[in-house]
RNA sequence: GCUCGAGUGGUGGAAUUGGUAGACACGUUGGACUUAAAAUCCAAUGAGCAGCAAUGUUCGUGCGGGUUCAAGUCCCGCCUCGAGUACCA
């Protein structure tokens, strides 16, 4: 009987589908929820890197099922958003069409690998029945505010009644900067528009106008985490600042809770660290400086109030609100010019230009609160409007940026550090100094100075301790077509919700869905995008009458809107009246293990925690973190090929031999690279435009290329399609091989050479069952040796799966089969249990043999074997005998021997005598069951 | 610059958390089967030195120190690579 994997895999995939083997329901059993980050269907299809995490999660799911858990292991598609839309644009088709096709392709590829996904729970974020609830959550956010008393989100009606009964009392400090002040009577008198404007400052989802990250090539605004190194994460296009009216989510109110929550979840430490850095908490003091001859005050934030006597200037951000009010007449023109210049710079220019110091003097002075000295006020783009108060106190002796700034503009650099040289650079350490020139702080170190100055500042009422976070509110508007419409319409420019009963607000079909350079949303191309407030239906734009028919919001939601809560919908995917029933939530939540890449650390994984906490606050969810444990699978790296062309010539080399700058590095499509990495340039000439006009001197027409490991990607010509592997070796081999490559969380290069080892292991295992093409098994009491092999393997596999050390599982299987092979074991009692053990790894293989040995039912619900310690007990140990820590020989001894007996045996051993050469050992260390060490 | 992670044979990687470093696999070499090749099976395989040989012996987990009977594992100081972040006051 041959191991015909192609036939077997097809057969079992069909049976699983027909028998709904992997569909699950609420039951009496304990639940276990294994979640994968769902893919976005991009059009390039799957490569062998994608399934890595899915295979690991599938093994865990199947294992937990054998262990008696009711396992929820769902899958779906993140089908709204930029990747899906960019693909549609590139191929000139409607996103709806390409998305559907791409999902089908993904599904087909996934199905071939034999995952135990419950596809009856499949969700697609672009499906109206799903995004109905994404829109509903937006509405909740629109209708909520963050209550500073209870420290949680609450329905905004609570705030409204508060204003109605006592005015702005509780929120006065918060509202003053916006220029509002009212008592309860005034509130009631306010018109709709004013009320709306005031409430907008509180809503969790709010409309605002301000500087945003604008990406012209993508035609949309981007959130901070969607920008990497000053360019867009998708496509790498430049990003600039632009003033745009947009929706934001007030995630910043959750900074502290998002930070604290990290302590309660078992997520990888590096990932938590990334989130902590992103949230960026810092403790400091807010201080206000009076502006000379003016009522204005400038509030600065500093983490080093101890250096207050080193202040020699103040700097404000170019976007500072009151900038012109606090400038002198004569400076206004130059300040305007400066602001203009700065806003023209792209994000990338700003980043690459950190060294250049620029700024303009406002022509006015602030008064130092302790010395009453006049301090010049400057504007500079090294101060960020969005962090702290948008103004800093310049302490050139204690901060390198302030130092550079003072140097450039010849501002005084007072030294406040006793005995420290600050002629070359600032002194930024928090230890190793005593203050001088600092009045009452003189002679103090950092800690005592901080304590004293905070006391003084609070006494003088010029400031208070303060905590700042880097985390900004998340920009929620996208000027793109392929996303959830925002369920808002505008009546007199006041935004109103389209309520749950009328959701989903379906994405209209438009002929031209392309993004525009100027930021007009493609939804503006729809001729039917107006809301009939009375009849609650969509109407043609031509009927907008501003009485009952109003324009609908044109922006759509970002890609992460749908992915921030999808793991809940799997629990109750077809519920049309609720996003999730209480019953199903309390059974299935939360996620026991979540598999996904660490690249989502500051995007999806932070937003989803925010959504969780928000929905928790409103009582829709019972936990405030959704996933106990997260596993970051590493990337599988592709093997890219390069050759180098000497600049301006047609000379090609396999390496850049002389100077990197003299060569163009040219990526070669891996398909055209033959054995031994020999490049067939003749083929390349045909296929690659880089080579079209090249002439080659090489007489063979071939070159060797260089190789590099990098992320697998279609654009790098280094992808390997899992289908190829399935064709050649089968899905079970692919599954086991991907696990065998190394630890799940590590990045590792894809190398097909090793795959034959795994494949021949499966064949060896298979062959244990057969002789001359017939089943050939004995059913009798297994030998001691067989039992030992079996139980050793059960123990190792169980422990390693629990640890998610899946690579070592594969090794143990190999060892086990090698041992059974060497003792020619064909005992069905042993092999039967091994089939269950291996079924999470190679499910088709296990099902087939399970069936062949006479079982009618699927193997998936068989109880996972338990090991029995009694078969593992050793009576002897081969002790290593070492001298001064170096092993010289081994001796086989009974484990029952006393230490003194062991010592005697070892010392009497001729080999010991030879080595000791009649020297008396200083000490003999015997660790029973482990080691013998003789110290000479 | 700051934060985090990692450096083990020709390669991917093991090592019960301080106890025989290199499991398992790939690759390579030799052999068996075959007219031949593929497939399969068997053996060897960290490096060096000595020996016909069994074997003996030295060096070996990025580098330099330290703790310990014993260090890939713990401590101190460096180096290299990778990831994240970037004027955050």
Image (tube, coloured by chain):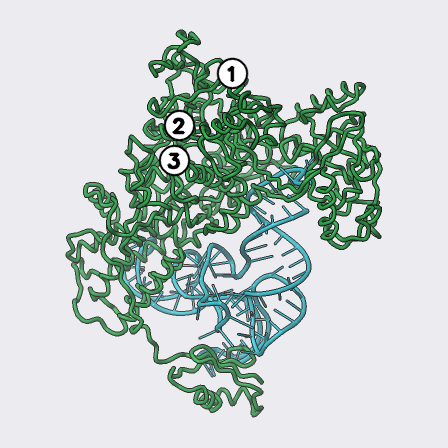
Chain colours: A green, B cyan
User: Residue A154 lies in what quarter of the image?
Assistant: top left
Asked if residue A679 lies left or right of residue A435, the reply is left
Label 3 chain ID: A
Instruction: Measuring from the top left, give residue A567's x and y in whole percent.
Output: 37, 40
Instruction: Measuring from the top left, give residue A899's x and y in whole percent.
Output: 45, 86
Q: Earlier in the sequence, mark 3 or mark 1?
A: 3
Residue A191, numbered label: 1
Evaluate whether label 2 is on the same chain as label 1: yes
Find disc 2 in the rendering and name its residue: A135
Instruction: Measuring from the top left, give residue A856's x and y in whole percent.
Output: 15, 53
Evaluate whether label 3 is on the same chain as label 1: yes
Label 2 chain ID: A
Label 2 secondary element: helix
Residue A131, numbered label: none
Q: Earlier in the sequence, mark 2 or mark 3?
A: 3
Q: Earlier in the sequence, mark 2 or mark 1?
A: 2
- Residue A435 seen anywhere in this rendered image of the structure: yes
Find disc 3 in the rendering and name its residue: A45
Q: Quadrant of the N terminus of chain A?
A: bottom left
Question: CB of mark 2 within 8 Å of CB of mark 3?
Answer: no
State the count of labels.
3
Label 1 chain ID: A
The foreground one among A514 and A842 is: A514
User: Residue A13 lies in what quarter of the image?
Assistant: top left
């Amino acid at each position: 009987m041959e191991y015909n994997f192609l036939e077997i895999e097809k057969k079992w995939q069909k049976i699983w589908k027909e028998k709904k083997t992997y569909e699950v329901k609420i039951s009496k059993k304990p639940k276990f929820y294994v979640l994968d980050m769902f893919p976005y269907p991009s059009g390039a299809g799957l490569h062998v890197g994608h399934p890595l995490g899915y295979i690991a999660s599938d093994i865990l799911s199947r294992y937990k099922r054998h262990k008696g858990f009711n396992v929820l292991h769902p899958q779906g598609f993140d089908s709204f958003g930029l990747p899906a839309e960019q693909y549609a644009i590139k191929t000139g088709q409607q996103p709806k069409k390409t998305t559907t096709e791409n999902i089908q392709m993904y599904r087909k590829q996934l199905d071939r690998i034999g995952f135990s996904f419950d596809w009856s729970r499949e969700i697609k974020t672009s499906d109206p029945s799903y995004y109905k609830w994404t829109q509903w959550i937006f509405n909740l956010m629109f209708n909520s505010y963050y209550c500073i008393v209870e420290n949680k989100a609450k329905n905004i009606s609570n705030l409204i009644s508060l204003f109605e009964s006592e005015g702005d009392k509780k929120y006065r400090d918060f509202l003053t900067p916006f220029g509002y002040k009212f008592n309860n009577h005034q509130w009631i008198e306010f018109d709709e528009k004013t009320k709306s404007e005031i409430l907008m400052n509180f809503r969790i989802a709010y409309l605002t106008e301000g500087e945003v990250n604008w990406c012209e090539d993508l035609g949309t605004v981007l959130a901070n985490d969607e920008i990497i190194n000053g360019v867009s994460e998708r496509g790498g296009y430049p990003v600039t600042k632009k003033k745009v009216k947009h929706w934001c989510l007030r995630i910043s109110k959750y900074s502290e809770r998002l930070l604290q929550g990290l302590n309660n979840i078992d997520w990888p430490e590096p990932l938590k660290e990334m989130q902590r850095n992103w949230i960026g908490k810092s403790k400091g003091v807010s201080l206000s400086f009076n502006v000379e001859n003016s009522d204005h005050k400038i509030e600065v934030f500093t983490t080093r109030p101890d250096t207050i006597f080193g202040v020699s200037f103040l700097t404000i951000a170019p976007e500072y609100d009151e900038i012109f009010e606090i400038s002198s007449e004569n400076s206004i023109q130059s300040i305007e010019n400066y602001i203009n210049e700065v806003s023209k710079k792209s994000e990338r220019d700003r980043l690459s230009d950190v060294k250049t110091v620029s700024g303009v003097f406002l022509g006015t002075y602030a008064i130092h609160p302790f010395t009453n000295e006049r301090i010049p006020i400057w504007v500079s783009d090294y101060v960020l409007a969005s962090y702290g108060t948008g103004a800093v106190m310049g302490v050139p002796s204690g901060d390198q940026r302030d130092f550079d700034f003072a140097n450039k503009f010849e501002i005084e650099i007072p030294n406040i550090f006793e005995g420290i040289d600050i002629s070359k650079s600032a002194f930024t350490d928090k230890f190793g100094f005593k203050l001088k020139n600092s009045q009452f702080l003189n002679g103090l170190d950092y800690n005592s100075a901080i304590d004293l100055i905070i006391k003084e500042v609070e006494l003088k009422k010029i400031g208070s301790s303060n905590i700042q976070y880097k985390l900004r509110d998340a920009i929620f508007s996208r000027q793109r077509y392929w996303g959830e419409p925002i369920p808002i319409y505008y009546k007199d420019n006041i935004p109103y919700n389209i309520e749950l009963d009328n959701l989903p607000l379906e994405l209209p079909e438009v002929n031209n869905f392309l993004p525009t350079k100027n930021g007009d949303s493609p939804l503006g191309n729809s001729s039917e995008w107006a809301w009939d407030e009375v009849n609650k239906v969509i109407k043609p734009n031509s009927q907008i009458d501003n009485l009952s028919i109003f324009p609908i919001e044109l922006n759509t939601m970002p890609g992460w809107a749908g992915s921030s809560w999808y793991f809940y919908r799997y629990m109750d995917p077809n519920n049309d009246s609720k996003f999730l029933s209480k019953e199903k939530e309390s059974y299935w939540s939360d996620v026991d293990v979540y598999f996904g890449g660490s690249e989502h650390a500051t995007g999806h994984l932070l937003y989803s925690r925010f959504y969780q906490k928000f929905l928790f606050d409103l009582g829709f969810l019972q936990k405030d973190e959704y996933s106990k444990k997260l596993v970051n699978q590493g990337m599988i790296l592709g093997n890219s090929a390069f050759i180098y062309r000497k600049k301006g010539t047609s000379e090609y080399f396999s390496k850049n031999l002389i100077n990197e700058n003299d060569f163009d590095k040219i990526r070669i499509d891996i398909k055209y690279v033959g054995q031994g990495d020999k490049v067939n340039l003749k083929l390349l000439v045909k296929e690659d435009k880089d080579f079209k006009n090249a002439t080659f001197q090489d007489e063979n027409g071939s070159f060797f290329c260089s190789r590099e490991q990098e992320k697998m990607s279609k654009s790098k010509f280094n992808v390997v399609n899992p289908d190829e592997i399935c064709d050649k070796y089968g899905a079970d081999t692919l599954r086991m091989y991907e696990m065998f490559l190394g630890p799940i969380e590590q990045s590792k290069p894809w190398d097909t050479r090793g795959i034959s080892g795994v494949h021949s292991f499966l064949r060896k295992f298979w062959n244990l069952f057969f002789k001359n093409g017939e089943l050939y098994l004995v059913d009798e009491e297994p030998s001691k040796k067989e039992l030992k092999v079996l139980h050793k393997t059960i123990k190792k596999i169980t422990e390693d799966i629990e640890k998610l050390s899946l690579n070592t599982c594969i090794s143990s299987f190999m060892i086990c089969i090698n041992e059974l092979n060497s003792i020619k074991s064909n005992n069905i009692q042993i092999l039967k249990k091994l089939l269950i053990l291996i079924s999470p790894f190679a499910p088709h293989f296990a099902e087939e043999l399970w069936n062949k040995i006479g079982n009618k039912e699927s193997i998936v619900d068989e109880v996972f074997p338990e090991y029995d310690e009694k078969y593992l007990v050793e009576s002897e140990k081969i002790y290593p005998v070492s001298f001064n820590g170096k092993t010289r020989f081994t001796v086989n001894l009974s484990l029952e021997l006393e230490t003194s007996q062991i010592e005697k045996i070892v010392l009497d051993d001729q080999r010991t005598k030879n080595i000791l050469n009649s020297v008396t050992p200083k000490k003999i260390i015997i660790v029973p069951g482990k080691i013998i060490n003789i110290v000479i």
